[in-house]
Image (cartoon, coloured by chain):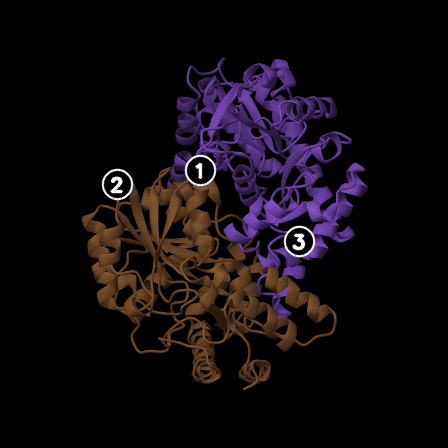
Chain colours: A brown, B purple
Amino acid sequence: MELLRRARELEAQGRDIVHMEIGEPDFTTAAPVVEAGVRALRKGYTHYLPAVGLPALREAIAEHYADRYGARIDPRRIFITPGASGALLLAMALVVNPGEEVLVADPGYPCNRNFIELVNGVPRGLPVSAVDGYQLTAEAVASAWGERTAAVLIGSPDNPTGVLASAARLQDLDAEVRRRQGMLIVDEIYHGLHYVADPASAVRHCRQALIINSFSKYYGMTGWRLGWLVAPCGYEAAVEKLLQNFFINASTPAQYAALACFTVQAREIFEQRRTAFRQRRDFLAPALCELGFRLPIVPDGAFYLYADCSALAADSNDLARLLLEEAGVAVTPGLDFERTAPHRHLRFAYTTSLPRLQEGVRRIAGYLGR
Amino acid sequence: MELLRRARELEAQGRDIVHMEIGEPDFTTAAPVVEAGVRALRKGYTHYLPAVGLPALREAIAEHYADRYGARIDPRRIFITPGASGALLLAMALVVNPGEEVLVADPGYPCNRNFIELVNGVPRGLPVSAVDGYQLTAEAVASAWGERTAAVLIGSPDNPTGVLASAARLQDLDAEVRRRQGMLIVDEIYHGLHYVADPASAVRHCRQALIINSFSKYYGMTGWRLGWLVAPCGYEAAVEKLLQNFFINASTPAQYAALACFTVQAREIFEQRRTAFRQRRDFLAPALCELGFRLPIVPDGAFYLYADCSALAADSNDLARLLLEEAGVAVTPGLDFERTAPHRHLRFAYTTSLPRLQEGVRRIAGYLGR
């Protein structure tokens, strides 16, 4: 955030900055979705909706799970939320009592800790690395589990690493957490942005999990603030009550607009964008390695590369600052994501065009004297 | 909620129900606001915004406070939130530590308790009645204040009573709470819907308060989920951090649309609607009294009448059920709002047209044999 502010400051002074720090697709919302939003507004769809969400949208998501993942999910288990942020808050309110622990991967999405702390839970980061595919394992969960552990939270694809959990990993985690009568929370907000065939999803491979998703990333609706939560059987009434109390409902125009995400026209646009992201990744990953960054795993999802910069600098914070000031390239230091080895890592987001990424790489090369 | 469900069930069976239970204006969003939303969408304003909100919207709210209330508020103290719900969550996260108490009026808005409990605070209801104008007094706060008390939360106009706090009441509460180094939280989401000249606002009469407001009620943007929080000096950085973590930002299209709320065209529509609400209140209050309900105070704000029905029934729950089943009129029982004397009270919302309110009164009269 500090760095983003400084980047904006430099731009205000006339400097050109290549943005590789932004966790938001550069694409605006697809035209079919925008037009669905416009139609909804003009029809006067501006009132409150049922707290659980628009029935047609819950059904569309259920169909999507059936079509794409072969998973049958009762629409009554799907709850529309104000962004994935709303779903994360619900998940924590549902399963964490004061003083209870939630196991998270380190590195991971930094806001997770704040949601856990909001309900006076205790986030406990478990280091992950290339050896375990940058994802928590059932073994790591088993050995960290204590009396006060209530839940395990993973992201797949994860932020900042971009890695996808395999079907086996999801199954093992699900079994381990069920055995301990805890709750597995799987954040799939980058799902859809994957560069392999048949990415595994918790909707298919977990028997009991709270699954979080979003219309922000693959569906390109960031500013609309719309997400969803899939709850296990038996949680329906509890989730509905929390939704009513904390949010009343997620944005009505956004829910009507989101219906268009499941049309053929919108899907085509999303897939073109996915191809663009893949091309960017396929350029950026080897280019960074050539510059001396290390990527033990080239990730298969999201739009991030979490690179080891220890061969280039003693402290990633200093490197991030220098890249911004000297080279005009904004990236995010590891300190924003982890406590294990923050000074070794930088996150590169490929949320800008290929020519801009090429320009960024040229500038970094120039700065490093390569 | 139970009652609303039953009302919908009866309607699905073909029954005609007069809705006097709904806490939402019957008007759709005003055309100038809808069209501003449409323009924003078509311009591609669908990305994230700064967590604190669109600068132009913060400034428009500050100008509104200057114009209408003669209060000078630095726009940097105004934070745009996902509905007043988002602002309530922020307020609780800001000021309540686990185990600390928040004093609230009983009766009051039921979700308040849940926001307090989300952060493991303890809501403590203090009975209010006609004697104190259905608002907490500085004296009541002083005598209830304990070691673990962190804050006082009032609504003005309040739900379900519709009463406005006077300037003197706000000043006294502000002074009392400051003296005790607590925080006063003033929920003004019904502000603008007042039927007296110059309603008092905490922005003018409190030196240190968290003030919550919304685009839902007066501005008619319920389903868009947009509100704001005014924070005291010194809280800016803390509020920004919480906003970033918990919400990322409030809906981008909604923020652009809301800019139009401060145009002359929109204001005219809002004022026409305010006149309509006033006419409804001026019909409904005496009509209910003629039927045997008691209204010790005819409130000057919001769109609710909180009526004592003890002369007509032993239990307001039974009466609400019977009015729905026998007379086809939906109202809300006191149980939803208070613990002191829930069985004596019913809330009537005048969020339906005058002819429908007249029909509702006819039906109640018929049921009561008047």
- The N terminus of chain B is located in which quarter? top left
Determine contact: label 3, label 2, CB under 8 Å. Answer: no
Q: Nearer the viewer, residue B259 or B119?
A: B119
Badge 1 or badge 3: first in the primary sequence: 1
Q: Residue furthest front?
A: A314
Per the model, the C-alpha gap separating discs 1 and 3 is 29 Å
Q: Secondary structure at mark 2?
A: loop
* Residue B16 horizontal side relative to residue B278, left or right: left
Q: Secondary structure at mark 3?
A: helix
Q: Amino acid at mark 3?
A: Ala
Residue at point 67%, 77% (across, down) = A16
Label number found at residue B258: 3
**B138 relative to A56, above or below:** above
Left or right of B108? Residue B218 is right
Give the labeled residue for mark 2. A147
Q: Is residue B113 above or below residue A230?
A: above
Amino acid type at image mark 1: Leu
Q: Is residue A255 visible?
A: yes
- Residue on which the image places disc 1: B118
Q: Is residue A256 above or below residue A357?
A: above
- Kindly check if marks 1 and 3 are in contact, taking CB atoms under 8 A apart as contact: no
Chain of the residue under label 1: B
Q: Along the horizontal axis of the image, is A49 left or right of A194?
A: right
Marks 3 and 2: same chain? no
Q: Position of residue B37 (x, y in %)?
A: 63, 60
Residue A23 seen in the current view: no
What secondary structure is found at the residue carrying circle 1? helix
Q: Which mark is residue B279?
A: none
Q: Chain of mark 3?
A: B
